[in-house]
Image (spheres, helix red, strand yellow):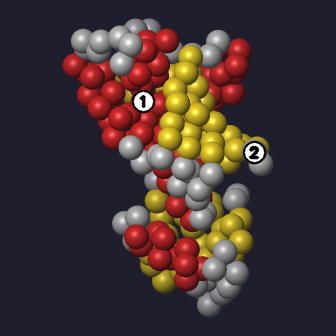
């Protein structure tokens, strides 16, 4: 359960600026509450507590932002297409800023890889990082997004467009291919999400 030491009025303004609805608190000690992407933020006098299974994006909106992050992503599909899931990790010099894994329904492995990259970039954008260094073990996604390979599949082309929209949120970015063992945390999160949902 992340706890963000901050001015609750400034945090409220950041959330409202991002289009998040902020409601009055439920008790006399709560200044306000907000729900976003499956998580709930509760503000007290000098801090905001974030609860829920996927707090990453809400925490990102509440923090001041800036700086550099390393972003890892991985998608997994059992069958091609089949049940699919994504995993992602956002790392700074202070350690893991956010991570997550979730099922995304039925998809091909390449579609899952793209969805994992999209989720990771959404979180990094919410955190307000200036620079992201993105790494994944899907050579296809890396080559297509960087323009080295054409994207002939219409569904993948649509996802590539979304990735480029998100990349414009950052002052600087790089995207590179890494071996699976370097990407093991994102891979674990994707597979754990698949296992949790059954297959």
Which residue is pictured at 47% across the width and 76% down the height? 13
**Residue indicated by mark 1:** 115
- The secondary structure type at the circle numbered 1 is helix
Residue at 46% in and 59% down: 36
- Residue 135 point in image, percent of width and height: 58, 25
> Distance from label 2 to label 1 (Cα)?
26 Å
Residue at 63% from the left image edge and 51% from the top image edge: 67
Residue at which label 2 appears: 93
Query: Considering the numbered disc 2 on the image, is that residue within a helix, a strand or a loop?
Result: loop
**Residue 118 figure quarter:** top left
Q: Residue furthest left?
A: 154
First along the sequence among labels 2 and 1:
2
Q: Position of residue 101 (x, y in %)?
A: 57, 35
Q: Nearer the viewer, mark 2 or mark 1?
A: 2
Above or below — where is 75 with respect to 41? above
Q: Quadrant of residue 9?
A: bottom right
Residue 98 percent coordinates (x, y): 64, 46
In the picture as drawn, the residue positioned furthest to the bottom comes out as: 28
């Amino acid at each position: 359960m992340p706890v963000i030491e901050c001015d609750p009025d400034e945090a409220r303004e950041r959330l409202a600026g991002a289009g998040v609805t902020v409601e009055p608190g439920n008790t006399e000690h709560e200044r306000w509450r907000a729900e976003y992407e499956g998580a709930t933020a509760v503000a007290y006098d000098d801090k905001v507590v974030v609860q829920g299974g996927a707090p990453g994006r809400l925490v990102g909106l509440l923090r001041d932002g800036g700086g550099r992050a390393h972003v890892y992503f991985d998608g997994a599909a059992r069958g091609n297409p089949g049940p699919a899931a994504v995993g992602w990790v956002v790392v700074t010099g202070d350690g893991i800023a956010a991570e997550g894994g979730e099922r995304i329904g039925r998809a091909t492995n390449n579609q899952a890889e793209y969805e994992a990259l999209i989720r990771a970039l959404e979180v990094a954008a919410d955190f307000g990082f200036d620079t992201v260094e993105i790494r994944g073990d899907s050579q296809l996604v890396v080559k297509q997004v960087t323009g080295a390979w054409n994207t002939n599949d219409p569904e993948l082309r649509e996802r590539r467009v979304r990735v480029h929209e998100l990349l414009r949120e950052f002052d600087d970015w790089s995207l590179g291919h890494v071996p699976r063992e370097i990407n093991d945390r994102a891979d674990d999160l994707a597979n754990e999400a698949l296992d949790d949902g059954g297959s």
